[in-house]
């Protein structure tokens, strides 16, 4: 049994979603964490609605998150943050996210706006004692205009800013209250970023880009990470793994990312599935049967 630790189920049409879930279950993906960001805060409740409406032994068990993506940081208003806090109180909402920093798109809010939205959501997660799901995208491969806007401290400024904010504002809470730190979603850093994330208590979740030929640094990080801190995800409908790169992704295809991660770590696919399933349950403090 595999768990897809990050999928945007609310981005499939109502007509497509039943087939997506049925194919996932048939492929052995029996649990999915549905990410509640939507196209903005006005839709961050939809993942939880999907989770609560899906209750069949022939479909995956679905948990949800809720959060305001850094691209939407300017919309982290008092009203939307109150909505997030209300969603976080639902037991089926197991995490806050995806939240973080994104210095890639030139139209994204400025760093100060992103930082303020991030810290506001950390406070909500701390109050709810829920782990956080981190999005971090650097300006390394961005357009020259984006690099000028976000990259004065270098192409990895997003990582440096993110880890500094987490060390100051999240690690003391997570260590002090025994709240699991959370997940570095779609981990795209190298060994250094992996080590620093692990030191802060985070799990690393690997997506389809692990299978791409140019992803040498990600594969090095995936081999480096301790066995009890790794997860797999699709980030569906994005980032389909090889051999489906460029096509619409869906949770059933997490088996290909899991196979690549198993090979990197000299494990059988079944051993990798058991390991990442156990890690997911440990992180979210869930019993395997719940």
Image (cartoon, rainbow, N blue to C red):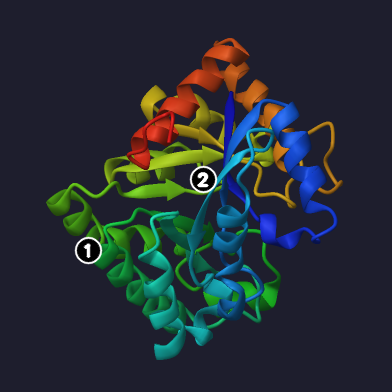
Q: Is 152 above or below relative to 47?
A: below
Can see residue 180? yes
- Give the residue drawn at x 41%, y 80%: 81
**Where's residue 37, x and y in %?**
58, 67
Q: Are marks 1 and 2 in contact (CB under 8 Å)?
A: no
Give the percent coordinates (x, y) of residue 187: 53, 45
Query: Could you say which disc has been placed on residue 189 in the image?
Result: 2
Q: Which residue is at the front of the view, 251 or 183?
A: 251
Residue positioned most to the left: 176
Circle on res. 253: none
Q: At which x and y percent is residue 68?
A: 50, 72
Q: Residue at x 41, y 78 (%)?
A: 117
Q: Position of residue 229 (x, y in %)?
A: 39, 32
- Is residue 214 visible in the rendered image? The answer is no
Residue furthest toward the front? 56
Q: CA distance from mark 1 to mark 2?
A: 21 Å
Compared with 155, 17 (above or below) is above
Q: Which residue is mark 1?
A: 168
- In screen coordinates, is 211 left or right of 1? right
Question: Between 265 and 149, which is closer to the camera in this rendering?
Answer: 265
| Image quadrant containing the N terminus | top right
Q: Nearer the viewer, residue 82 or 69?
A: 82
Front: mark 1 or 2: 1
Q: Within 10 angstroms of label 2, few (less than 14), some, or many (20 or more) residues?
A: many
- The quarter in which the C terminus is drawn is top left
Q: Residue at x 46, y 32 (%)?
A: 230
Q: Residue at x 46, y 83 (%)?
A: 80
Of label 1 and label 2, which has the lower sequence position?
1
């Amino acid at each position: 049994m595999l768990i897809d630790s990050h999928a945007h189920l609310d981005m499939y049409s109502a007509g497509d979603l039943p087939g997506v879930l049925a194919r996932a279950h048939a492929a052995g993906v029996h649990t999915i964490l549905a990410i509640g960001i939507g196209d903005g805060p006005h839709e961050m409740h939809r993942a939880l609605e999907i989770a609560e409406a899906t209750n069949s032994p022939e479909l995956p068990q679905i948990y949800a998150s809720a959060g305001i993506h850094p691209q939407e940081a300017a919309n982290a208003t008092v009203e939307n943050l109150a909505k997030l806090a209300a969603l976080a109180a639902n037991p089926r909402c197991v995490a806050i996210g995806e939240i973080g920093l994104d210095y890639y798109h030139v139209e994204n809010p400025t760093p100060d706006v992103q930082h303020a939205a991030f810290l506001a959501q950390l406070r909500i997660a701390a109050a709810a004692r829920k782990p956080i799901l981190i999005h971090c995208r650097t300006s390394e491969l961005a357009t020259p205009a984006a690099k000028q806007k976000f990259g004065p401290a270098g192409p990895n400024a997003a990582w440096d800013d993110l880890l500094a904010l987490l060390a100051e504002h999240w690690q003391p809470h997570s260590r002090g209250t025994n709240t699991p730190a959370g997940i570095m979603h779609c981990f795209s850093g190298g060994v250094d970023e992996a080590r620093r994330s692990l030191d802060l208590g985070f799990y690393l979740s690997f997506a389809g880009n692990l299978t791409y030929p140019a992803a040498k640094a990600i594969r090095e990080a995936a081999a480096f990470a301790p066995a009890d801190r790794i997860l797999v995800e699709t980030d569906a409908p994005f980032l389909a793994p090889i051999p489906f790169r460029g096509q619409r992704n869906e949770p059933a295809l997490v088996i290909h990312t899991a196979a690549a991660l198993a090979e990197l770590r000299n494990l059988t696919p079944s051993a990798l599935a058991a390991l990442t399933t156990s890690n997911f349950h440990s992180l979210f403090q869930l019993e395997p049967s719940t």
